[in-house]
Amino acid sequence: MADFIFNNPVKLHVGPGKFGQLGNVAQQYGKKALLVVSDSTKPTGQLARAQEALTAAGMTWAVYDEFMQNPLSTLVEAGASLARQENCDLVIGIGGGSAMDMAKGIAFCALNEGSIWDYVFGKKQAQHALPIILVPTTAGTGSEANRTAVFTNPETHDKKGLVNPLIYPVASIVDPELMLTLPKRVIAGPGADVLFHALESYISRNAHPFSEMLSLRAITLLAKNLPRVYADVTDLAAWEQVTFASTLAGMAIDCAGTTLPHALQHPMGGLLDVVHAEGIAAVYPAFMEYTWSAAPEKFAAIAAAMGVDTRDMNTEEAAYSSVKAVTDFLKSVNMLPSLTELGVKEEHFDWIINNVQTTMKVVMENNPRVPDAQTLRDILQRSL
Amino acid sequence: MADFIFNNPVKLHVGPGKFGQLGNVAQQYGKKALLVVSDSTKPTGQLARAQEALTAAGMTWAVYDEFMQNPLSTLVEAGASLARQENCDLVIGIGGGSAMDMAKGIAFCALNEGSIWDYVFGKKQAQHALPIILVPTTAGTGSEANRTAVFTNPETHDKKGLVNPLIYPVASIVDPELMLTLPKRVIAGPGADVLFHALESYISRNAHPFSEMLSLRAITLLAKNLPRVYADVTDLAAWEQVTFASTLAGMAIDCAGTTLPHALQHPMGGLLDVVHAEGIAAVYPAFMEYTWSAAPEKFAAIAAAMGVDTRDMNTEEAAYSSVKAVTDFLKSVNMLPSLTELGVKEEHFDWIINNVQTTMKVVMENNPRVPDAQTLRDILQRSL
């Protein structure tokens, strides 16, 4: 066992109907909230419910909803200005990963002057951020359970995470009832992302006994239950497991990080605005083929958690069976695009490979086997 | 899924050699520490190492070591006086469960006037406690990972826990190297207690998906590795798993509590100073026989986690097999005393039953099946 530190201070409020407690929860942390929300919170009535809940709890609020699927650092800074101007003492993010990461960035920038990139790249140190409450409306990033928020720099196209204990949410509300009207595409993509987080954190060189427990549990719950909610979006019992898996995986990446697929996706997201889970899914079969033999016991455990009956296999057979299990799983939820379909072409490879080896070097080196530039090119080529 | 709240703010420093970082960890939280230590920390050199580490980190310290296996509330209050008199701004507990609980109680009472029982029984509310750092030197209570500290009132013989978020340790150091010289009796008793915590939190009516994950993982790790360290106290790899299991189980009881065996042990500890794990072990077979059929799926999972091959059994068979698996396990580490051997006699039953039904009512009602007075008497009778 490597020695490790585990600390996750987020207060998780989990279960059907918990969104109804937003007012009670929020009033413990502030008087005026900036609501940072996805567009989807309007037609679903989630934004209106939040506003009513805060008002009923004696709080006031302002709304910020200007961002996109790969949140731009410039819009974070605009949101932070609004938070200061409105004298907000709390930021509440309601939505998918982008809204939650945006909320984290705004809470951070509201109390820290200058460019967020100075903090991302460790040039400046911060002491404070506004308290953050997160409410996921998709089961995907697990951002509600960790201290990471990923942004894109529109000037350099760098996409990179701010990782800072100051942006742990003080509380998160994980309510599976918020998932019951999601369109299929917003089930499959974020759902696959849960698998990616769980699998990569499990095999990461930074994994430790606590994170491994979280990762494997997330894989087991997700593999069983994502197909159920994909088939029937109203299956609340299955959503309970999927949302919980998402939160567990979000805790796991907080310990152990992600690996090669996330390293490859970030430049694609930054350069071409590729949807997070789709960019990752496209490289997954090639990544697994390349990686499994470097950590056979872990991939064998992944196969078992995916539901493969590995009892009559040796470790190598079981490990290799995980490649097919994950590939089949992604196919079953229509989440196995090619890079070509996502607009990634050979002409982008040089930029992507260079960016992976600079901006995403640390993440790439979490992988049990670390590719050189030529191998990265092969993986991308095989994923076209 | 019942809805639930999960929050555990303890910063866990886990791994061989981590005790060497005590000074670096402690200086983040205070300038003068009260060291609350078990007697065993003297011959093992642990107290001296702690004193040197704090001095090297530029801190000062005082020592408090006056307590017993079932810590008395009067001695907590004496320790709190010492902390105030010495102007300590941090309490460090090093030892088994008693030392750690004593440290928690002292950190609490140092900033809260009056009797600790007023807080235990909810008559007074507290706002502050000194920061607490815990270092377990046995793998047992898991107190390093939760907000509970159990004390005995020498006037009433009540033994009851203070449960308060203010006594979460700010940090704990879980170093398996500290276990390498433990005598067999101090391996088996605390080790069995890990199993008791994990099993009871797993079946508790307050269990939830997060605590269930912690509990089952603890059972699996403990069942495999406690026999190894019992056979060879120098087996560091096995100690890593046993100490981690203890911490996981400590987190699990923080979520879900314990059940009937702990409810029965507390009056025995309070009245007759029975050793915690021994009192519990004595009633375990009768408790399991009485309880298993009320939660067959959970007991079946316990059997599997204990290492029983349940694949060809139906749920009831698997569940019932857990009774024998646990009983055999306790026998294998010489931890299956009778109540008679522990000095508990039929003449004590009335007092014990009355105390269980008053002081320990909440804990008893966590059990999947709740016994009346006659059934409690039967369980005690069968355990003589």
Image: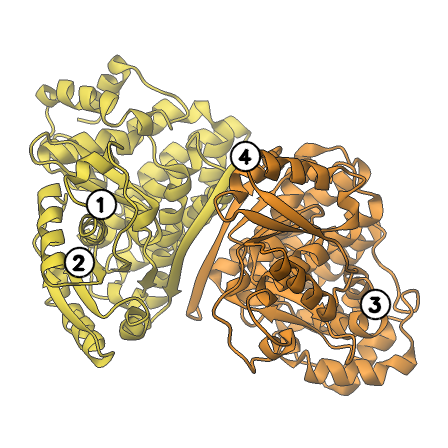
Chain colours: A yellow, B orange
Task: Name the residue type under label 2.
Answer: Pro
**Earlier sequence position, callout 1 versus callout 2:** 2
Q: Are marks 1 and 2 on the same chain?
A: yes
Say which residue label 3 marks. B273
What chain is tagged by disc 3? B
The spot of residue B247 in percent (x, y) is 60, 50
Residue A291 drawn above or below residue A189: above
Task: Name the residue type under label 1.
Answer: Asn
Say which residue label 2 marks. A183
Task: Give the distance between the C-alpha atoms of the residues marked 4 and 3, in whole angstroms.
Answer: 37 Å
Say which residue label 4 marks. A3
The spot of residue A185 in percent (x, y) is 18, 51
Could you tell whether B275 is left or right of B361 in the image? right
Could you tell me which secondary element the residue under label 2 belongs to? loop
Say which residue label 1 marks. A334
Q: Residue at the location (50% across, 44% down)?
A: A210
Camera-near label (2 vs 3) is 3
What chain is tagged by disc 2? A
Task: Give the distance between the C-alpha atoms of the residues marked 1 and 3, in whole angstroms.
Answer: 63 Å
Q: For the residue carrying disc 3, how many other residues have a C-alpha within 10 Å: few (<14), some (14-19), or many (20+)? A: many
Res. B3 image quadrant: bottom left
Could you tell whether B85 is left or right of B232 in the image? left
Could you tell me which secondary element the residue under label 3 belongs to? loop
Camera-near label (4 vs 1) is 4
Pick the front one: B330 or B111 = B111
